[in-house]
Amino acid sequence: MDKKKIDYDEVINRMGYFMNRANLSARATSFRFDHGEQFMKRILNKQVELKVKTLLEFFDIVDITPQDFFYLGKEYNKEDKNMLDMFNNLSSEGKETIVNLMKQIK
C-alpha cells in the first residue's frame, strides 16, 4: 500500500471512491446530508471547501470509519477490515499464535 501524503485532491477522490462503493450518486449523497441536490457536486468539483464536520458525517453516510478513509483508502476491503478487527481483539498470545500460523502456511 502506498503511504504517500494525502492532500485535498486525494480526500476528494476518496470521497468519490467511497460513494461509488456505497452505490451513491452525488445527488443521493447530498440528500442524505439533508442539503440541496448540488451539495456534493459542489464539494467534489471543489467549488466549496470541505468542512471537517461534513467529512465526519460523510463517514457515517457511506458506513466507514476515519481509519478506513485515511489509512486504507482505495485499498479498503470490508472482509480484510473485519479480519484486522478480530486480530486486534485477540490477546497477545492469540496474536502470536495467528502470526506463527500465517508464517507456516505462507
Image: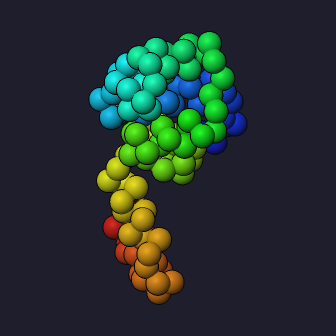
Foreground: 103 or 32? Answer: 32
Residue 24 image position (x, y, % from top left):
33, 27
Location of the N terminus by quadrant is: top right
Q: Is residue 30 left or right of residue 54?
A: left
Foreground: 36 or 14? Answer: 36
Does residue 1 appear anywhere in the picture? no
Residue 32 image position (x, y, % from top left):
38, 32
86 lies above or below 76: below
Location of the C terminus by quadrant is: bottom left
Does residue 8 appear anywhere in the picture? yes
Residue 45 image position (x, y, % from top left):
56, 13
Quadrant location of residue 10? top right
What's the residue at 34%, 24% (across, down)?
A: 28
Quadrant location of residue 63? top left
What's the residue at 56%, 37% (across, down)?
A: 55
37 lies above or below 67: above
Foreground: 23 or 102? Answer: 23
Residue 37 image position (x, y, % from top left):
41, 17
What's the residue at 48%, 50% (across, down)?
A: 65
Q: How is the image coloured?
A: rainbow
57 lies above or below 30: below
Count of numbered badges drawn on the protein: 0
Foreground: 43 or 98? Answer: 43
Q: Is residue 37 left or right of residue 14?
A: left
What's the residue at 40%, 40% (across, down)?
A: 61
Residue that lies at the very extreme toward the bottom in this rendered image: 93
35 lies above or below 97: above
Q: Is residue 8 left or right of residue 29?
A: right
